[in-house]
Image (cartoon, coloured by chain):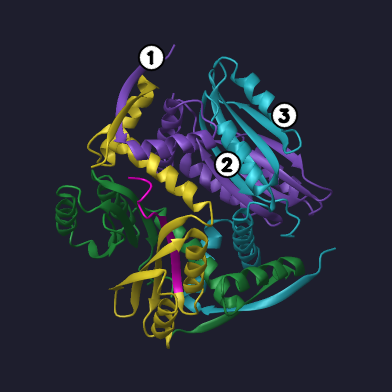
Chain colours: A purple, B cyan, C yellow, D green
Amino acid sequence: MAELVRFSVSMDVQLLERFDKLIEVKGYSNRSEAVRDLIRNALVEEQWSHEDEEAVGAVSLLYDHHTRELSDKLIEHQHSHHQEIVSALHVHLDAHHCLEVVVIKGKAGKIKQLAEEMIGTKGVKHGRLMATTTGRDIV
Amino acid sequence: MAELVRFSVSMDVQLLERFDKLIEVKGYSNRSEAVRDLIRNALVEEQWSHEDEEAVGAVSLLYDHHTRELSDKLIEHQHSHHQEIVSALHVHLDAHHCLEVVVIKGKAGKIKQLAEEMIGTKGVKHGRLMATTTGRDIV
Amino acid sequence: MAELVRFSVSMDVQLLERFDKLIEVKGYSNRSEAVRDLIRNALVEEQWSHEDEEAVGAVSLLYDHHTRELSDKLIEHQHSHHQEIVSALHVHLDAHHCLEVVVIKGKAGKIKQLAEEMIGTKGVKHGRLMATTTGRDIV
Amino acid sequence: MAELVRFSVSMDVQLLERFDKLIEVKGYSNRSEAVRDLIRNALVEEQWSHEDEEAVGAVSLLYDHHTRELSDKLIEHQHSHHQEIVSALHVHLDAHHCLEVVVIKGKAGKIKQLAEEMIGTKGVKHGRLMATTTGRDIV
């Protein structure tokens, strides 16, 4: 079990009121949960600014599955990096478009590179890398 | 078949040299492909600035699957919005952590709201929304 | 004088250790200050997602001051929106390039529009909008 | 005088129509200008991902000028880094709040560090770093 600690935060009463409204809108159950999320976001951002940190990324790839040989190319690319590329989700958006979300685990720099290669593949219409974390250091 | 058109872009020779280096690093096969991607990114960004535009988002949720009832809560939430929430990928990162990537389709404003609710759920350690598109208008 | 309140935040001991390292790197003097900044960032982000909220923005415009009539055009544009455009800083980066930072106050939607018009002016080589706040609601 | 070149971009007719609408909204005078801006943005982003690249940043600092000794501290900090910190613009937003925009020139990594120190100063309510460029390589 993880050990819990408490610390107190001082704040102007108006800032706290605004914060309480925000966490209500965002659906948080309490302040601690919301503060922890802000802290984790800041940590993940910091992690991703160092190329050698272990991280996890999810890449979205939007394409027309009729594009010749594109699926083959993307699968080929993913397999040749099977140590980093963990798995993929394929969503059929309409008769033409599919969205593939590929999860990559490895050093931040390597994840960026693999993501850029996939996003840059001819036929991929839109692609984005979402930076997240292995979770290990942000219990 | 989509109809292709061509237009020409004028540019300082040094800016073009820098661009050519960048697209090499990013692994693009040619300039048109790289310019199209920049344009599509700009369009998707614009789309997401209007709450009523149809869009697609992918939400990453990192959590410890030992957290009591968390998986149940997330699945429950997803089912009660089954019209927008298309599907989900579950990745086992280590003995404790899993990454879930949930694909949501609907109005940009609604996607944001659903994403925030899931990210704000107690026990979710890190969450991010990745904005992408239905593809329909950015052939 | 603003009234100060305190609330306590519970957190896993490891997450707190990581946070303490981060705030040391970022040069914060204590945890409350760092948490308040995370909260204010989240509030400003929320503010900017509503087009009608009062906000403040700073636009950076990089250009070659030899570009014909560009300075005139930019000054003209700023004056015709003098109710929103507060003031500007002009920095001489080298013999050719100058950086102009223009501060705009008004509704978030209007600030975005004015920023885009200036960034889109022929001859402006790089431009960015930085979203900040009037400060009034985030004491 | 800079040497101009032309290259042609092929694109689906619908994508081009959407792009033309976007550049109209953003107030660009022609396609080349808009494409050049997208390219420059991509280049600046790439520049900032390398800590040793020469860059330019603008930091916004929002604070209440009644905060004890804050202005002194900020000026002191800026002077002790006068080689990087070029100049600053001070805007009086209301009776209490001021916005200071500080322009920093140097290596991307150093700019980030100086910006974080200023943003982290007790009393600064909101701060953001806007990444731009010396302009030299993106004529």
| Disc 2 residue type (three-letter) | Leu
Quick check: C92 left or right of A85? left
Identity of the residue furthest to the top in this view: A1
Q: Is residue D135 above or below residue D47?
A: below
| Disc 1 residue type (three-letter) | Glu
The chain carrying label 2 is B
Place of residue A14 in the rendered image (x, y in percent of width and height, measured from the top left) = 36, 40
Magenta run includes residue B92 = no
- Magenta-highlighted residues: C125-139
The chain carrying label 1 is A
- Which residue in the protein does label 2 denote? B129
Which is more N-terminal, label 2 or label 3? 3
Identify the residue shown where x is 47% and y is 37%. A21
Residue C126 visible in the displayed image: yes
- Which residue in the protein does label 3 denote? B80
Distance from disc 3 to disc 2, alpha carbons, whole Å, reads 19 Å
Q: Are marks 2 and 1 on the same chain?
A: no
Q: Is residue B81 above or below residue C78?
A: above
Q: Closer to us: mark 3 or mark 2?
A: 3
Place of residue A76 in the rendered image (x, y in percent of width and height, measured from the top left) = 69, 43
Binning the other alpha carbons within 10 Å of mark 1 as few (below 14), some (14 to 19) or many (20 upward) gives few
Binning the other alpha carbons within 10 Å of mark 2 as few (below 14), some (14 to 19) or many (20 upward) gives many
| Disc 3 residue type (three-letter) | Ser
Residue B18 visible in the displayed image: no
- Residue A3 circle label: 1
Image quarter in which the N terminus of chain D is found: bottom left
Magenta run includes residue C127 = yes
Identify the residue shown where x is 48% and y is 34%. A23
- CB contact under 8 Å: marks 3 and 2: no
Identify the residue shown where x is 71% and y is 60%. B138
SS class, disc 2: strand
Distance from disc 3 to disc 1, alpha carbons, whole Å, reads 34 Å
